[in-house]
Image (cartoon, rainbow, N blue to C red):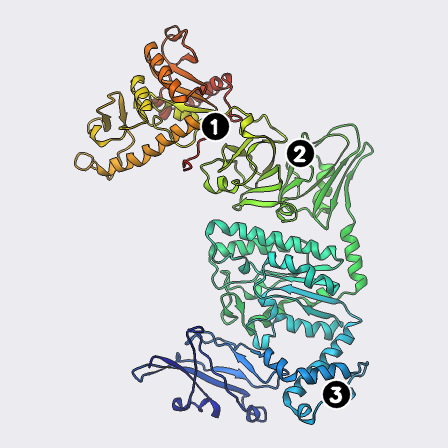
Amino acid sequence: MGESIGLVGSTPELGEWDVSKCLHLQTNEDQYPVWWVETDIDLTPFLNSSNQQRIEYKYVRFYSDGGVEWETVGPNRWLPCRPDPGSDTLTVDDGAFGYLQPWPYAYWDQANRTQNFAKPLKNLIHKIGIGSKTREDDIFITSSPQEKSSQGFQNCLKELIHNIALLYKAKNGLKIVVIGSSVALGHNAWLMKGWTGYLQEELYEKYGHQLVNVSLSGSNVTTTIDRFSEVVTPEKPDIVIIALSLGNEGLAHCPPHERAARQRKFETGLQELIEMVREIGAFPMLGSVYPNGDYTAEHYWLLQRTHQRMLSWGIPILDWLSVLDDGQGRWREGTSFDPAHPNSKGHRLMYEAINLNLFDLTAKDLAQKQQILDTPVTLYKDDKGLEVLSHNQNRSLQIVNSSANCYIISSSWQELQTPLQKHSTLEPGIYLSHTVAEHIPSYLWVRDDKVIETTLKIPPSVELEYSSAFEFFSARVSQVLFYDGQITILKQEESLLRIINESNHEYNLQPMWKEVRQALKGQVSGVYTDVLNPDLPFRTMMIGADGLESRVKVPPLSSLSFKYQCPLSEINRVAILPIGDRCAIRMVLHKMEYDGPAYPFDLTRTTNLSDVTDIIENGFFDMWNPDFLHYNHEEARIYHGKWTGLSFAHEIEETDDPLYDFSPVYERMRYRYEGRSQRFLYTLNHCDEVLFIRTGMVDKEQIKDFIAKLEEKCQGKPFRILIISPQPSEELAELTNVVHYDLYLNPDHMYEDLGYWMHCTEVVRSILDSLGVSSKNLFWCPPKIPK
């Protein structure tokens, strides 16, 4: 016989603390490790006694060797004894062995209640007469004397009479609907009477309001939006309280890089629910966020950010965080049942934190509030046709220019900025234009002091509306493809993508950013260009089967709109492939941000172009073969025995000892150069045109040999060779597809002098521009070659 669990306590049914008379719990394969027992307890002695009206008990563990372990020393578990309406069967959930809750949790067995009293309740409902003075004597039922006399029936009868009275009185008050999750349902409070239960009673007693709770355990913003029209709209409420938690969005246990996205999804979902409440003519209120026992410091920072943002939305808030938070995002001691739920004490604190004056309203009061929100505020208007209005309900800015002139809105225009600061409800952040078109400013940035910092050129005869970028996160407006707290990628239409940078620094989106690249996988392949500034560098977005295939620069505190222009096949994408002799080209391409994953000759020295030609012709076979590699300790370089002009200077690490054990170096080189050679050949095969670039001295015959062998390798694909070397261009004259510049790019000098490095970068940029190669047509090789 294995271990078992017993229950011993202060009543005769529980053995009166004699462990030999305890109740033995049961379990089975399907339910383990849950243990349970059912028993009847006579409460009469407790209810009639002036002594402490509660039952006390503990659990004990019985071991197979006969040993007995009591729960931890300390207070006993306990249950209050008072006549509560409802079922005769109470389910008590005590959590884990040895873990004592500061307040018990139990709920009536609803199935048992329905089964026992279905008939009398049905008769009662059919026969009852409702009046302003309804009493128990006014109710006539057709049921047996035995049914009438049962305690359970009498309790149900009293509860029903009470509810009928509530309904009658609520005719003169407002109808309030609560939609939330398990905490709003009262989970883990005694008899499921949570903050909503207390609020329901108080609102009726004080104002005559009726509260209807349509919450569902486990709900998050998505499921709540989905069920809103089914459970809230039919109630025709005057007020809707939205009470959801960040915990149900998975914040506590999602990967760290997803936390900001979960937070934004929650906030956006709340905004969407607020709009849904307004659309049915009701007044929205919000339950604030609350702690979670599994939150860390970063979770707490996100929790506080969300809390502060919610307070700024202009919506009445039931503010719970301050009374429940321990200062680290977790529950205050003694207020929680488990990491996600408050106990009875916590629920009581939540109720007591509610400002009941928020509900001191009539239907007329609500109508007046709604009228104020619906009326836009004129911030500026002149006699030439410009009008700027603030819409307080959705916190948007409307700019109407009915004149034939352009207007420039800047931060120094005090006639506009001053009323904007005083009378608008705009919050700091980025606002997006609902109109996406050429010459239309796509965004504006509002500073912390409510000043519009962005300079806007407003064209004539337009009516523009700018809403918080937050609004565009709604599933009804856009699909969020990527969000990390700073950068957002939204798909607003099939052919329209918006990128929002909420940080104070420029962001580079490029294919080596795995999450960004994959976020765009599955979008329509093609070329997307910036609607407002299509000719600026890095404002062309190329999307292929594997996602992003180009680099895009997003300025700080800005938003860019990219529209689909054409398939990738309609542009000629040029690949830049360095072919030695040193790393100068790699260095200047890095400063130009034209670089991507490394290629085989980027970080090597290849003094002989014939070696490069032979390596490419042979598919890079033997390039990292250890039989041909030998280490020169004095020069700290690895030389190649087959191609004597080839050497490596960046492969030895501090922990290596290549003179005695070359294997770690070889394994690294094998991994690196296999990948680099695969990328080289992939690029050669998949780009539309190749521009080979070499620095260092070459002769005419070497170039001819390279051209002859690369023509076969490229299989008819056009290619050009750019030679940058300190030799007369006449030496390379009359060579087809060869461009030469008599220059010397010294990589050693670049490392020593940033000014020289940037000078070389601008020289090469101008050369590439003259050859028609830019960020608008640059081929980008993926870091990992698709199989």
Along the viewing direction, whichever of 623 and 182 lies nearer the viewer: 623
Specify the quadrant of the image occupied by residue 500.
top right
- Whether residue 782 sits left or right of residue 628 in the image: it is right
Q: Nearer the viewer, mark 3 or mark 2?
A: 3
Which residue is identified by label 1? 779
Sequence-first tag of 2 and 1? 2
Q: Secondary structure at mark 1?
A: loop
Of all residues, the one furthest to the left in this rendering is 660
| Amino acid type shown at disc 1 | Phe
Q: Is residue 11 visible?
A: no
Q: Are marks 2 and 1 in contact (CB under 8 Å)?
A: no
Sequence-first tag of 1 and 3? 3
Along the viewing direction, whichever of 515 and 522 lies nearer the viewer: 522
Which residue is identified by label 3? 141
Quadrant containing the N terminus is bottom left
Q: Nearer the viewer, mark 1 or mark 3?
A: 3
Q: Above or below — where is 261 with respect to 58? A: above
User: Residue 578: x, y in percent?
Assistant: 38, 23
Q: Nearer the viewer, mark 2 or mark 1?
A: 1
Along the viewing direction, whichever of 366 and 258 lies nearer the viewer: 258
Q: Residue at x 65, y 90 (%)?
A: 150
Which residue is identified by label 2? 441
Q: Secondary structure at mark 3?
A: loop
Along the viewing direction, whichever of 171 and 491 lies nearer the viewer: 491
User: Residue 493: x, y in percent?
Assistant: 63, 40
Q: Is residue 400 visible?
A: yes
User: Residue 190: x, y in percent?
Assistant: 57, 77
- Whether residue 566 sits left or right of residue 680 in the image: it is right
C-alpha span from label 3 to label 2: 72 Å
| Amino acid type shown at disc 3 | Ile
